[in-house]
Image (cartoon, helix red, strand yellow):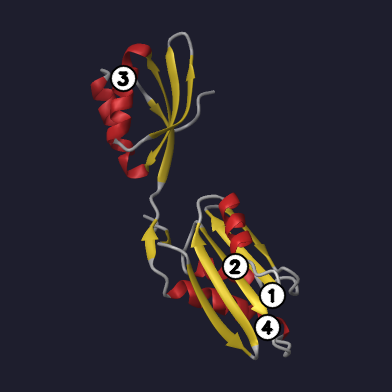
Amino acid sequence: MAAMSETLAHAVSHRQEIRHSRFLAHAAPVEEAAAALAFLAQVAVADATHNCWAYRIGGEYRSSDDGEPAGTAGRPILAAIDGQGLDRLVVVVTRWYGGIKLGAGGLVRAYGGTAAECLRTAPRVPLTQMATVWLHCGFDDLGTVHSVMAQCLATKAQEDFDAEGAWLCLSLPAEHLPGLKNQLRDATRNRVHVREQPPA
């Protein structure tokens, strides 16, 4: 079984000086790209030389060198996130140029190292693996379905009605999925079937 991913428990920061350039990293847990970009807007320093950043949210990721030579800032920050095994996270590294050029290798080490050091000591929390499922139930079983959903910590992502009843799309912690299936089977005498693929 794959190791459970982690994210940060809360926002953290770390500063260091490298050959007279000052680097300040800010990292925070995020659930979606919009939140990552909002955090960037919040912590970016307008009069700094560069505000470089990266985020990872599951399979979605983006990074920016913000004017540094291509590949010397954003990608090393992303590599620091991935190297620490973290997910649902954004890191912004702000640089104030100190008069000494670091060169491409020096920039990669400076940005990647500042991000990695910021994350290395940060408090973490495990991420709950979520599952998305679909089911159809008759109107008579709706109350039962909602009761079982509450017990299994399932939330309704979508609900559509047809002549026979309701189609529900549910999101719930993956560990509760077997319980949801079993409870619905028993409580509805096998009338409600949980599907792991959307209906055609």
Question: Residue 148, percent across and down?
Answer: 29, 29
- How busy is the neighbourhood of tag 2: few (under 14 within 10 Å), some, or many (20 plus)? many
Q: Give whichever of discs 1 and 3 has the lower sequence position.
A: 1
Quarter-of-image position of residue 187: top left
Q: Give whichever of discs 4 and 2 has the lower sequence position.
A: 2
Relative horizontal placement of residue 198, taking residue 21 as reference (left or right): left
Quarter occupied by the C terminus: top right
Residue 7 is labelled as none
Query: Residues at badges 2 and 1 in contact (C-beta under 8 Å)?
Result: no
Question: Residue 93, percent across and down?
Answer: 60, 72
Quarter occupied by the N terminus: bottom left
CA distance separating discs 3 and 2: 47 Å
As helix, strand or loop, the secondary structure at mark 1 comes to loop
Residue under the point 50% across and 72% down: 13
Question: Residue 45, percent across and down?
Answer: 65, 70
The amino acid on which the numbered mark 4 sits, given as a three-letter code, is Gly
- Residue extending farthest to the left is 186
The amino acid on which the numbered mark 2 sits, given as a three-letter code, is Val
Quarter-of-image position of residue 176: top left
Residue under the point 38% across and 68% down: 123
Foreground disc of the pair 4, 2: 2
Residue 92 is labelled as 2
Residue 105 is labelled as 4
Q: Which residue is mark 1?
A: 48
- How busy is the neighbourhood of tag 3: few (under 14 within 10 Å), some, or many (20 plus)? few
Query: Residues at badges 4 and 3 in contact (C-beta under 8 Å)?
Result: no
- How busy is the neighbourhood of tag 4: few (under 14 within 10 Å), some, or many (20 plus)? few
Quarter-of-image position of residue 180: top left
